[in-house]
Image (tube, grey):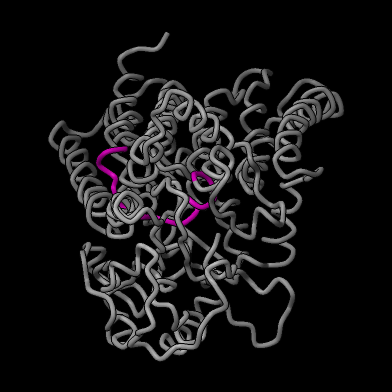
Amino acid sequence: MWNRTFWFFVAVRIASVFLVTTWFVPDEYWQSLEVAHRLAFGYGHLTWEWAAGMRSYLYPATFAGLYKLLALVGLDSAELLTLLPRILQACLSAYADYRFHVWCRQSKWSTFLLASSWCWFYVGSRTLANTLETSLTMIALSYFPWASECTPFLWPVALSFFVRPTSVIPWVPLCLYHIKKSTHPTWELLLKRYLLIGLLTGALCVGVDSYFHGAVVFSSYEFLKYNVLNGVGSFYGEHPWYWYLSAGLPTVLGVSVLPFLAAGYESVRHRKVYKERAILLLSVCFTVLVYSLLAHKEFRFLLPVLPMCLFITADYLARWSRKASSKMIWFTALLILSVNGLMAGYTGLVHQRGTLDVMPYLATTAKDYRDEFNNPAKILFLMPCHSTPFYSHVHQNVTMRFLHCEPNLTDQPNYLDEADQFYANPMGWVRKNLPVHPLSALPTHVVTFDVLEPQLKDFLSIYQEKVSFFHTDYPTERVGGFVKVYERYDRNAASGASSTTSTTAVPAMEDESDPLYNP
C-alpha cells in the first residue's frame, strides 16, 4: 500500500514542475509535445526523425490523448497544454521514486539521495523520453529477481527498449546475471520469458507506431540504423571518449559522486560480500563504456544509470552510518543537500530560461494580432534551431519559421545546414530568404538572441524591440545572454494593408505560401 513516502515523492516531483522553469534540450518538446500537438490538433512541425520513422509515437501519443481530452472540455489553453504533460510525467516519476525506495529496502539514505538529487529534480518532470526511460528503469530494478525466479521486471524493460532502444544497454549485464543464476533451463527462460514478453510488448509498440506513421515501421531498428550504424548523431556534436568519465557522470551525480566512488571501490574490493552492488557497478561501467564509444555524447544519456549509482551510494552510506558519529552523518547530509540544492536552484530557475519565458509572450501577441488585425502574426526565430518550443506553447495556427538543421542524409559534399548558412552570413541569408515587397510579407515579429543585434542591425531597422528576456550568464557566439523580440514598425501592414516601402535591400520571395515560411 502506498504510504507517506510515496506522497512525499509526489510532492517533490510536482514542486519541480513549477520550480524548474528553464530550457534543457530540444527533445523535451520537439520529440514529445510538438508531436502530440500535431496529432491532437492537426498542425505543428515534425522533425526529420519522424519522417525517417526512427521515433516511437508511444510517448507523444499519451500526451496527444491528454490534449484531445482538454479540447473536448474546452480547456485546451496554451498554459494547460504545457503544464499538464509535465504533471503527468512528474506523477510517473514519483511512482518510480517510490519503487526505488522499496528496492532500497526503505532505507532513509535512499529517500534522501533520490529526493536531493539535483539532476533528477531537474529532469524528473520534463517530457523527455530519457525521463520516461529512467522511470521505467527504476520500476524494473525494483522487481529485479536478486533472490527469486520472477520476471515481471522484463515488462518495463521491454517497453523502455521500444521507446528508446539504447535503454537496453544497462540491462545487458543484469539480464546475463539473471539467466546465469536461474534454475530454469536457459532455452526455456529465453523463449518463455524474454522472447514472449519482448514479442508481446513489441507487437503493441510496432502497432502504435505503424498506425501513426501510416505504414509498417520498426522504429527501434530505424533508430539504431541512423544513430549507431550511420553515425548521424555525431552531426549534433562530438566529444572525446573520456567525456563521460571526466564530465558526464560527475555532473549527473553532483556531490554524490564522492561517496559513490568510495562505494564503488568498496564494492570491487569486497565483491563477494556486496554482490548486488558489484553487479550494478558492472552495469554502470558497461553502459559508460558503450556510450563512450559513440561520438555524440550528452548528460541525459546517463540518466538510466543514475538510480543504480544512487542505490550503490545509499547502501554504502547506510552501512557507514552505523559506525560514523551523528555529527559526521549530519555534516555529510547537509553537504549533499546544500550543494545539490544550489545546482538544482541555478539550473532550474536561472540558467537558460529566456527561450521558455518568451513563449507565453508570443502566444499572447499572436492572439492580440488575430483579434486586433484579423490576420495572424508571422514569427521568425533567428537563433540556433530548436532553441525554443513551438506550437505546443503557442497553440495558435499562425506562421512560425525557424532555422532548420537536418543532418546530411543525402551525402552532399560541403554540406551546411540552414542554421550554419545563416550564422556564416546573417544578412546574406536575410537578403536571400526574405521578401522586399510588400512589407506585409515580412515577419511581424523576429525572435533572436542579443548577440546577433550588431550583425542584423540593417534588417532590424524596420523593427522595434518590444521585450527582452534574460537567458543565461554564460553567452556564447550563437547563444546570447538575452532573448529579444522585435516587432515590425508598420502595424497597418500587419493587418494586411499593402506597402511598397522597405528599408531592407533584400530580394523578393515568391509569396507567403513558400515552404520557407509555412510549417
Q: Which quadrant holds the N terminus?
A: top left
Specify whether residue 237 is painted magenta: no
Q: Residue at x 40, y 56 (%)?
A: 375
Q: Along the line of sight, which residue is nearer the eye, 226 or 208?
A: 208
| Image quadrant where residue 124 sits | top left
In terms of depth relative to the viewer, which is nearer, 333 or 434? 434
Residue found at x 42% / y 54%:
389
Is residue 269 visible to the viewer in this orientation of the structure?
A: no
Q: Quadrant of the C terminus?
A: bottom right
- Residue 18 belongs to the span the image colors magenta: yes
Residue 153 placement, left or right of 6: right
Whether residue 227 can be seen here: yes
Q: Residue 5 placed where, x, y %?
A: 32, 19
Q: Is residue 314 above or below residue 37?
A: above
Decide if residue 302 is on the left or right side of residue 475. Answer: right
Query: Front-most of 365 and 2?
Result: 365
The boundaries of the magenta stretch are: 17-33
Q: Nearer the viewer, residue 486 or 187?
A: 486
Question: What x and y, as percent, mark residue 71?
Answer: 46, 30
